[in-house]
Image (cartoon, rainbow, N blue to C red):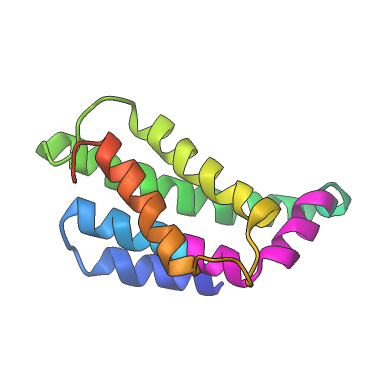
Amino acid sequence: DRRQFRVAFILARKAPAAQTLRELVVDLVESTAASAHQALVFWREMNRLDDERTAQYRRERRRYHDAVVRLVRKGQASGEFSRVASAETVTFTIFGLVNELPLWYRPSGSKKPSEIGKEFADLVLTALGAC
């Protein structure tokens, strides 16, 4: 999957945790916005997937989720991020923000996906004391 490739590429650079998290959030917002309509349909129809495809989707989602949890933990362990919330809560917050995007994002809107991604990343990183 393209998203997993991009995540692996961003993580492989071994940049500081804040820079890496920023890039991951912006990438996630941009890729979600690019397929917002399809994502909305998928979320509404996901219950129709057979067991094998559901398991595959969950494995892929879990790999992405776990990569973000590890990144946040690393930033917290190094002192780059505060421990205001657990790495799991931070990760669920990020994905919660992004998962709502297809409900309100419009390509004709006033902000580009990169701008929305930057705002989301700023919000998360400010909460983590990294901005």
| Nearer to me, 104 or 48 | 104
Q: Is residue 43 magenta?
A: yes
Q: State which region is magenta.
A: 29-44
Q: Which residue lies most toward the right here?
A: 48
Numbered disc total: 0
- Give the residue displayed 63% in from the left and 71% down from the top: 107
Displayed quadrant of residue 37: bottom right
Left or right of residue 33: residue 40 = right
Quadrant assignment for the N terminus:
bottom right
Q: Position of residue 84 (x, y in %)?
A: 27, 25
Q: Is residue 127 magenta?
A: no
| Nearer to me, 13 or 51 | 13
Displayed quadrant of residue 25: bottom left
| Nearer to me, 6 or 108 | 108
Residue 113 versus residue 63 in the image, above or below = below
Q: Position of residue 23 (x, y in %)?
A: 32, 63
Residue 70 in view of the camera: no
Q: Position of residue 73 (x, y in %)?
A: 26, 38
- Give the residue displayed 42% in from the left and 30% down from the top: 89
- Give the residue displayed 80% in from the left and 59% down from the top: 41
Residue 129 in view of the camera: yes
Residue 117 versus residue 81 in the image, above or below = below
| Nearer to me, 84 or 51 | 84
Displayed quadrant of residue 105: bottom right
- Give the residue displayed 36% in from the left and 59% down from the top: 118
Q: Position of residue 112 (x, y in %)?
A: 49, 70
